[in-house]
Image (tube, coloured by chain):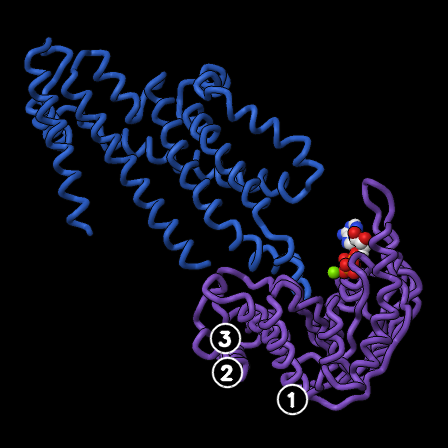
Amino acid sequence: MTGSHIVVDRLSKRYDTSTGAVQALTDVSLSVGPREFCTVIGPSGCGKSTLLAMIGGLLGPDEGSIVIDGRRVAGPDPRRVAMVFQDPGLFPWLTALDNVAFGLELQGIPRAERRRIAADLLGPLGLREFALKYPRELSGGMRQRVAIARALAIDSGIVLMDEPFGALDEQTRFLMGEWLLDVWTRARKTVVFVTHSLQEALALSTRVVVMTARPGRIKSVIDLPLPYPRDLESPEIASFRAKLWGELREESLKTMNQ
Amino acid sequence: MRRGVVLPRAAIVGVLALGWEITARSMDPLLYVPPSRVLPALGRLVALESFPYLPEHLWLTLREILIAYALAVGGGIATGFALGLRPGLGRIYAPLLGALYAVPSVVWYPSLMLLFGLGAASKIAFGFLLGFFPITLAVLAGVRQVDPHLVTVARAFGARPGTVFARVMLPSMLSTLTGGLRAGLALSVVGVIVGEVLGSKAGLGYLINYAYGLLRTADYVALVLVALALVLAIDGVAALGERRARRWA
Ligand SMILES: Nc1ncnc2c1ncn2[C@@H]1O[C@H](COP(=O)(O)OP(=O)(O)O)[C@@H](O)[C@H]1O
Ligand SMILES: [Mg+2]
């Protein structure tokens, strides 16, 4: 399935904790079109993960709504949305292949078929030889690729990624970005990608959403209508970087001084 | 590897038996029986000459163990999950459980005999009591071991609570759970046999106590060896089950 349309409308979310209430999101509205690569960037604690969890149906909104292809989100729906988290969250007792097939298994697809689909995905991801390895035998980058393959396997129109490369070193991170771009170009899904890396946002996105410090609101949306692969040293990217950093700097300073 | 284990083990048993033989021969023959007298006694026991009703007694003990263990497994798993999955309940009651477990369990036995009488029921109750705690505590520890992130991932992929339980919680807890189930079995066995020794009219423990009371020391030692064989056989079955469970995960 290819690109779905996400409409987030006046979303608010508050967490009630023993030490008082935390307003995580206030009045967030956002529209992500089919086949977009939309990056969400903002200081830590501004509610990016909360926003993603709500689009994925893992959390319900206090106010507002999320509508995907005309249908309101009321809970996790893997037929429409797949998720990747910063912690790959692979099941340690399953091989890479069976981890990739996990979502398919829950959808009741027979073992032979789901293994075939999973194996077809692992090949192009450079993991063919690792299909029968367990997560503990894989490197951090491989684990995250397996987690991404697990998300791609269920063939949803949307993939949500919450800082998927946040735990990887700089070089691996860069290569994973290139790799993800390649996957996205071929799979043509709608991606919402959370990061705190300017470079990643500039290299990957068709548009960047900047969020304010807590309580999270949308500060600005910047379109990046540039072809891939991008030369991060080009003057065009440099001007986008300056603009993005201007927006982000203010919010990061707020978070630092809180 | 097999031979590297068997030989040293046989050697230590041989050395101990020899030491026992030498020591016992120089002591009061009424109280100290050397292996050379135990073996014939064991032969008579197995040939059903010394205790013709040995199979009935063994069978009774085995049934008591099975019932006690089944109750301990059911009760322990239910209690463990009830407390583990409801953090509120767990906070209130789990410490009580730990405190009860710390009490030397034999102190409960007299009250169990008063409640359930001299028959099988009090042995089953004692075996249940001993097996129940390690199983409950293993379930509690296992629930705490489950990585909440994996639960979130499973939910994101559409898992409902039953699926989360079967596909995430059980595999996460498996080694703790099987460890607890095995410890619980060993303790249920101990509970039943100790219960029989302390006061009963039938069962392996009763025979042991009977032989001991009549100073039939060789028969007594032979019966203890039978108890040992029974325990080893039960633990062997448990180990087999544990290995299978691990393969399933
Ligand atoms: N389950 C929760 N309970 C209470 N507070 C939470 C919970 N999850 C997140 N928060 C708080 O909500 C705010 C937003 O969190 P999050 O969405 O994780 O931000 P981000 O992903 O941008 O770092 C933070 O202040 C965080 O401490
Ligand atoms: Mg986050």
Q: Residues within 10 Å of mark 1 (few under 14, many from 20)?
A: few
**Letter of the chain in purple:** A
Sequence-wise, the earlier of marks 2 and 3 is 3
Asked if marks 1 and 3 touch (Cβ < 8 Å), the reply is: no
Please name whichever residue, A98 or A89, is drawn nearer the observer in this view of the structure: A89
* Disc 2 from disc 3: Cα separation: 18 Å
* Farthest-out residue, top: B28
N-terminal of the pair, mark 1 or mark 3, is 3
Hue of chain B? blue
Q: Which residue is mark 2?
A: A123
Name the residue beneath numbered marker 3: A111
Name the residue type under label 3.
Arg
Q: Residue at x 61, y 26 (%)?
A: B96
Q: Chain of mark 1?
A: A
Q: The residue marked by circle 3 belongs to what chain?
A: A
Where residue A168 appears, as percent x and y from the top left, is 60, 66
Give the residue pinned by disc 1. Answer: A186
Please say if A189 is above or below B64: below
| Residue type highlighted by circle 1 | Arg
